[in-house]
Image (tube, grey):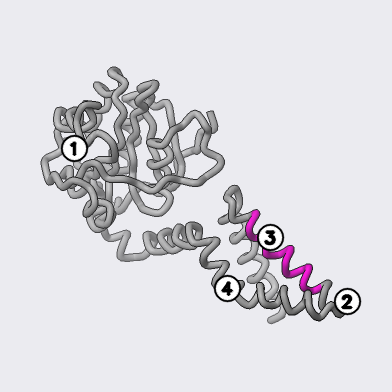
Amino acid sequence: MKDLLETLVIALVLFYLYRWIRGTFAIQAALGLLFIILINAVVSLLGFTTLNFMLRSVLDVGVLAVFIIFQPEIRKLLYSLGQNTAFDRFIGRTGSDSVIEEVINAVKVMAQSKTGALIVFARSSSLQDLVDVGIRIDARVNAELLQTIFQKDTPLHDGAVVIRNNKIVAASCYLPISQNPNISSVFGTRHRAAVGISETNNVFVVVVSEETGRISIAKNGALTSGLSIQKLRAEMEKSLGEEKEGDVGFSSEKAELEMN
């Protein structure tokens, strides 16, 4: 019975490990490591001493190689575990109704004028490393201010605005780019950055395309594109609206990653 339970645990770990790295370059790297292990086993059986020594030397640094090769995936997993703690669930929502309305008003104008924008709603204790390297603003969320920041002729337009504690805390913040191969090639750096930051942080991101004016959102590592203003408002109220009784934290519902 104990052996059966142990086998089931190992099988579950391997299953979820595969789901975790599926669709990333890590799956190819894992297959490569598995191939080396199998070759080493065959070489050992055949008694090829020199080849066995060389392959064992490679495998001796295998643990370090795993941490180097899978560093993005490991970081993503640790962030995911960290943001699901009990402490995290006690932190309230990040946007009041007035903040949501100001952002929606700005997005509506920027979508019509095809002004590219990247707006990140962060939890009260997150993204400090990105804020520190951006341009500090610490201003009330205002539709006109957001439009001004993202105008092409302003020095702050290239990068993201971070909204935290109902304030614009920083602009021109550069976000990590997602390496997810499932993101359609029609999406550029701005959308990949939105997905990238939502893969490793519990954030809600609004994106306006500079090429098409299309409105998108990113959360939980997924991107939903082509939203109307009404749909954007509904998504923001669901994920960011003022906390109601029994509600804490961001909405856990995962957005669909659009492929076209």
Residue occupying image coordinates x 53% and y 33%:
184
Residue 63 badge: 4
Residue matched to label 3: 32
Residue 99 badge: 1
| Main secondary structure along the magenta-highlighted residues | helix
| Label whose residue precedes the other's in the sequence (2 or 1) | 2
Q: Residues within 10 Å of mark 2 (few under 14, many from 20)?
A: few
Q: Is residue 245 visible?
A: no
| Label whose residue precedes the other's in the sequence (3 or 4) | 3
Residue 214 in the image: x percent, y percent?
38, 24
Residue 107 in the image: x percent, y percent?
27, 27
Identify the magenta region: 28-41
Q: CA distance from mark 2 to mark 3?
A: 21 Å
Q: Secondary structure at mark 1?
A: helix
Question: Which residue lies most toward the left here?
Answer: 139
Residue occupying image coordinates x 38% and y 63%:
82
| Label whose residue precedes the other's in the sequence (2 or 4) | 2
* Of residues 125 and 50, the one drawn nearer to the viewer in this rendering: 50
User: Can residue 106 be found in the magenta stretch?
Assistant: no
Question: Would you say 221 lies left or right of 134 here?
Answer: right
Residue occupying image coordinates x 31% and y 28%:
116
Residue type, label 4 = Val
Residue matched to label 2: 46
* Vertical side of 58 occupied by 218: above or below: above
The total number of labels drawn is: 4
Q: CA distance from mark 2 to mark 1?
A: 69 Å
